[in-house]
Amino acid sequence: MQPLDFFDQAPLAGFMLVVALGFTLGRWNVRGLALGPAGGTLLVAVTLGALGLDFSHLYVSENQPRLTLGALGFALFIYSVGFEAGPRFFGALADRQGWRLVAIGILANLLALGIAVALGRAFGFTESMAAGVLAGALTSAPTYAAAVEVSGDTHSLAVVFALTYPIGLVGLVALTQVLPRWMGDDLQTAAPDADTDEAERATVLRPVLRRAFEVRQSDAVGRSLAELDLPATTGCRVVQIHRGSEVMPPSAATRLQETDHVMAAGRLEQLTAFEARIGPEVYDAELRKRLPSPRAVVVNQPQAVGKTLRELPVLRRYHCLVTAVRRQDVSIEASADLRLERDDVALIVGRAEDVRAVSRHLGEFERSTRETDLAVYSGGIVIGLGCGFLAKLFLYIDAYAVGLLAAGIVLGRFRRIGPWSAHVPAAARQLVRDLGILLFIAETGVAAGGQSFDSVQDRIPELLAAAAVVLLVSVVGTILVGRLLLRLGPIESWGSAAGSMTSSSALAALRRATESSELAVAYAASYAIGAVFATLSGRWVVTLVGM
């Protein structure tokens, strides 16, 4: 009995083996570089396929495939890409202020697509090879998955994707570290906004701290928090008050008494101003022990969407503090100039009834992370596949990926229709997305590994060179257009470029170079557009090269 015979008899075990080894390999980090789950799984799948692992018996024939785990993974992944992009996709298109970041998200993918098509024709690549070059150069799993649907040679596509993936991974991270310095962009000190002076810039980059102060200043004793208006005069917000044996949450009507201990939140220079206004800093173990946990509020009310935190009087009225904002699963520091967008999740600290009042103004509390509406995935996939079926029936084209993507975008955007709400926690969305693409890559990678590499082995230098050119031209071209034509700052340009390529590795490398929250804002703004166009590019490259 051969070592891999067991997996022929139990193919589910073979799938799980590939996923387990691939995911583990993908998380292995060497000096900030990691293959990622998709890259690791692809490498393991091709290797095991070459060693004899085979899933071909899962098919009735080449033209009549059974429902396999790979097909299920494909549907889950493409739908998840659309569902996660949905909340930001329509808002990005309608956002007059963020149109430049949207333009970067589109430009980067179209530029990479154009270079891949041109090189594919120049070198005489097949459409599958060109698609593999494009997906590998951008380390884009959505591009690869969409290309597989319309490719006539999925084996070459998977092999080329595996060969060029390291070029995209190492090259993109290297470019984010080297190119900014070569262009004279110091991301560490770059201003979030061209009109922001040095003092304001330093304020944006410093973390929010919490300190306790004893009320000693005579002009603070006996006055209410509303009268003192500490957020406006010092930039700090009162979180809790310790009076005698009682720890109480603050309200606008709360009057400070001498020797009260007040817990305030703010940046270092703001806390210094607070101390001058209230009294000396003290250590209060009771206040530290009773710090309230932040509540997550989903922003969806029209009066809050598009407003900066500075423009929301409800926060000052109820003395609540926004500690951070989650957007596209990226955490953004809650600076006063941060503009809220639909479906942002604001983490708010304050008295329970005050936080409830703020939540009604901003939107609604985020539902429990233990609740997942599976109907929004199963039903959405039915709708997406139905759209793809109609396209094949009447237009004679395979458009299941486009149907799944469109259904995901629409349901992801309109998560609440009347009393019906489609809630899927971030952790659940990531699990479905990652498991879907890993199952799909496991199946296609194993199949590719079991085939002869004769069709590509003589062209490996050309394929690697093409991937390097696609990456270099698309990144440099995107940054130059962003800086020179669209007048974006360094952080906005690089953040949006990383988002347009949906590259978490590039984002991590950029975050090591700068602490600015503008990086996360730019990344999230272009990510939604980039994810959609990266998926469509997988179909387009096959079509354009094959013309």
Image: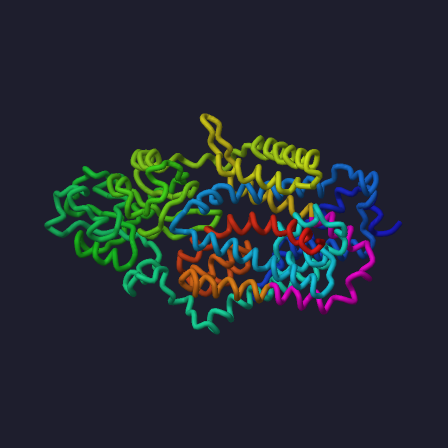
The number of discs equals 0
Q: Which residues are magenta?
A: 441-470
Q: Quadrant of residue 31?
A: bottom right
- x, y (%) of residue 347? 38, 44
In this picture, is 374 found above or below 434?
above
Give whichever of 190, 455 is nearer the camera: 455
* Left or right of 214 on screen, residue 505: right
Residue farthest to the left, as pictured: 218
Please tell me whether the stretch drawn in magenta is mainly helix, strand or loop: helix
- x, y (%) of residue 379? 60, 31
Residue at the (21%, 57%) spot, across then down? 273
Residue at the (55%, 56%) spot, across then down? 501
* Left or right of 297 on screen, residue 111: right
Give whichever of 177, 403 is nearer the camera: 403
467 within the magenta span: yes
Give whichever of 453, 123 is nearer the camera: 123
- x, y (%) of residue 325? 40, 47
Give whichever of 442, 242 is nearer the camera: 442
Residue farthest to the top, as pictured: 419
